[in-house]
Amino acid sequence: MLTLYHHPKTRSTRFIFLLEELGAPYQLKTVSVRKRDGTGAADPANPHPHGKVPALSDGGEVVFESPAIALYLTDKFPKAGLGPLAGEPGRGAYLSWLVYYGSVLEPAFMSKFLNTPVPRGTAGWVVVEEAMEHVIGTLSKAPYLLGEKFSAADVLYGTTFAMFGQNPMMPKSQIIDDYAKRVTARPAFAKAMEKDND
């Protein structure tokens, strides 16, 4: 049985979405987390080394960091077809989009949020506008990051863009708005929202 360590209205909610898409058996374990306002605390029951969510346990095998969890789950449940397997067409693009999310997009957003200039030539990420130009360029050609087919990469990006949709950090784009609506219109997303609010 998979256990998703979860805190409501955080990044872990998108993994309820992914688990529902996969049709995987899982249980939720709600844990406390440190909050921006200084309240809360890391939960000793949470296996994430920094007390964050999401974290996933699979019979004692612990996976943390969103791209790693997405890859782990799509490799574990290949019949769902939510991520190309090793040797299949599209695997390289899939891995690149997963890693780009954690290594480029999130740092770009955090740099903008903290009003910290991106150190050109030394940082592994770029400014938000440059990162989003790449994403928008890809989504201007097809409905999903891998083309016509929805994948776990879209779970990461689509839910992030839905969350940040009205945030001034996000460049305005009808392509991104439409993409976020497409991703969050899926029945598994509605189920995740229900479970997140239980």
Image (cartoon, grey):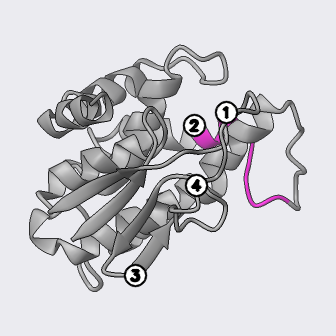
Q: Residues at badges 3 and 1 in contact (C-beta under 8 Å)?
A: no
3 vs 1, front mark: 3
Residue 94 in view: no
Q: Does 181 appear above or below 85?
A: above
Mark 3 or mark 1: whose residue is earlier in sequence: 3
Residue that badge 1 annotates: 129
The residue type indicated by label 1 comes to Glu
User: What residue sits right under mark 4 in the picture?
Assistant: 43
Q: Position of residue 60 (x, y in %)?
A: 38, 81
- Viewer-nearest residue: 58 or 105: 58
Residue stretch in magenta: 123-131
Residue drawn at 90 percent across, 50 percent down: 119
- Residue plotted at (48% across, 49% down): 31
Q: Badges 1 and 2: C-beta atoms under 8 Å apart? A: yes
- On screen, residue 29 versus residue 121, left or right, reads left
User: Does residue 113 show up magenta in the picture?
Assistant: no
Res 61 label: 3
Amino acid type indicated by mark 4: Asp
Q: Residues within 10 Å of mark 1 (few under 14, many from 20)?
A: some
Q: Amino acid at mark 2?
A: Glu
Disc nearer the start of the sequence (3/2) = 3
Q: CA distance from mark 3 to mark 4?
A: 18 Å
Under tag 1, what secondary structure? helix
Instruction: Indicate which label's residue lies in the foreground, 4 or 1.
Output: 4
- Looking at the image, is mark 3 or mark 4 nearer the viewer? 4
Q: Residues within 10 Å of mark 2 (few under 14, many from 20)?
A: few
Separation (CA) of disc 3 from disc 1: 37 Å
**Residue that carries the numbered disc 2 in the rendered image:** 133
Specify which label sits upstream in the sequence, 2 or 4. Answer: 4
Circle 4 SS class: loop
> Between marks 1 and 2, how big is the CA–CA gap?
6 Å
